[in-house]
Image: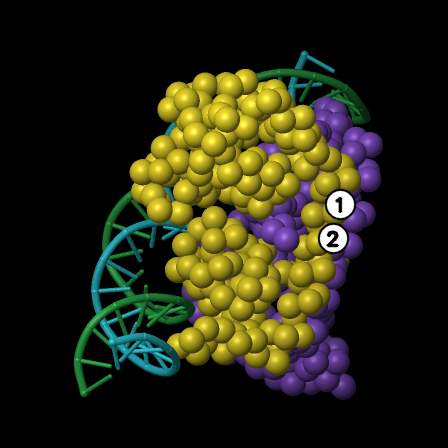
Chain colours: A purple, B yellow, C cyan, D green
Amino acid sequence: MSHRIPSLNGLRAFEAAARHLSFTLAAAELGVTAGAVSQQVRKLETSLGISLFRRLPQGLLLTAAGEAYHPRISQAFEDLTAATEAVAPDINTRAFSLGLSADAVHLLPQPWPERRSDLRRYLRETQVTDDVALILDNALDAVVRRGPPQLSGLSALALSEDATTSGFHFVCRNGLLNCRQSQAIVEELSRLLAEPALSETEER
Amino acid sequence: MSHRIPSLNGLRAFEAAARHLSFTLAAAELGVTAGAVSQQVRKLETSLGISLFRRLPQGLLLTAAGEAYHPRISQAFEDLTAATEAVAPDINTRAFSLGLSADAVHLLPQPWPERRSDLRRYLRETQVTDDVALILDNALDAVVRRGPPQLSGLSALALSEDATTSGFHFVCRNGLLNCRQSQAIVEELSRLLAEPALSETEER
DNA sequence: TCGCAGGGTTAGAAAAGCTGGTGCTAGGAC
DNA sequence: GTCCTAGCACCAGCTTTTCTAACCCTGCGA
């Protein structure tokens, strides 16, 4: 009755890569580098003794085996996700606790986010800090600050396209970039930070 | 669409432990120590923020959450296994290539296993060697030799109960101890090695 | 013909995982 | 009561796995 499954992490990499048909996009989703995804997939193929992708200079294609494999793996992962959400629902429903660096607070119209009732669902509280280590301690869910985090285990998204290195970043635990909470908060912040002056005159 | 799943290895440990209601048995199945399973499960519980087992001095009990979680996780793993077997069937159907140490060959009635046609389904070929490293190189599926292997990544089963340390062992890759091939071969060898003299007179 | 985007490969660094020791508790045999 | 055993918890140190950050190569389009 033992389950002989080839490396679960390899399967996760395959699932994401097959969905995006790109190691680069899969890597972004998983919060690692493309090289890591490439390695995981290759190891999976080796252990199965078959190849799952055709690597073309322009990108990826699934082989027949990969084509057959992917939907079933994907479904199983969805089942795992659903089961997990059922027993530990807070992962998805709890509102985030957000850290804001002092200069980020400056750019936001005050009081924020108290006036945005639609955001309360995703945002429970904010505090002024740029210490991304608090995320790893479970004291915060995310932090907005200048510059990407220098800590592994964290993913970051640049809020303004033009300044990938020193501009504002939304930082959270790996794998939490795509959840509802993150997306709602990032969307709102991107809008505000893009035109800080405008947001002040929006008051009525 | 990203799947936020708490450590897949933790889930695997949980699945096995819940099935056996024992870390010790789960560890044996997974080919690791009980401490490793205990750590994996604890980490899983921490990341979910709930507890899955009630630990009693006499053993384990599932909590309500664990009770609800287990069948769904178990099912998903079975789906993964089934999908994997569908695209890479050899894992389960291919006959094993077996290494036998010289002293093991001595104890077996010759020619073996050529006379046992019922075993041919599980056993493709044998060669005389006790080098367990060949298993990790995919050159062999299993080895029978004196003493347990001193190499990680391998599991072993003592063929005679009385000599766990220096007696004959069936050695294979972690997680392959319970497959059909291993079980058929181990059963046959245990019988032969238990009464080597008898097996010689069985000829007709 | 260049720049760029996407993959591949690699060494070395970081993280995760495992082991094997110790300690604790409950139950059973004497 | 006192041993002994079975199970799980904890911990330090080690091994294995995984990731990163370089590099390279190929084909496309300006």
**Residue C10: image location, x then y, percent:** 47, 24
**Residue B163: image location, x then y, percent:** 34, 43
Secondary structure state at the residue bearing disc 1: helix
Number of other residues with Cα within 10 Å of mark 1, as a class: few under 14, some 14 to 19, many 20 or more: many
Q: Is residue A157 above or below residue A125?
A: above
Please tell me which residue is depicted at 75% across the width and 80% down the height of the picture: A118
Please tell me which residue is depicted at 41% across the width and 22% down the height of the picture: B106
Q: Is residue B46 visible?
A: yes
Please tell me which residue is depicted at 45% across the width and 36% down the height of the picture: B195
Q: Is residue B156 visible?
A: no
Circle 1: residue type: Ala
Q: Quadrant of the C terminus of chain B?
A: top right
Circle 2: residue type: Asp
**Cβ–Cβ under 8 Å for marks 1 and 2:** yes
Residue that numbered label 2 is attached to? B79
Q: Is residue A110 above or below residue A16?
A: below
Q: Which chain does the residue under circle 2 lie in?
A: B
Tell me the number on the disc at residue B83: 1
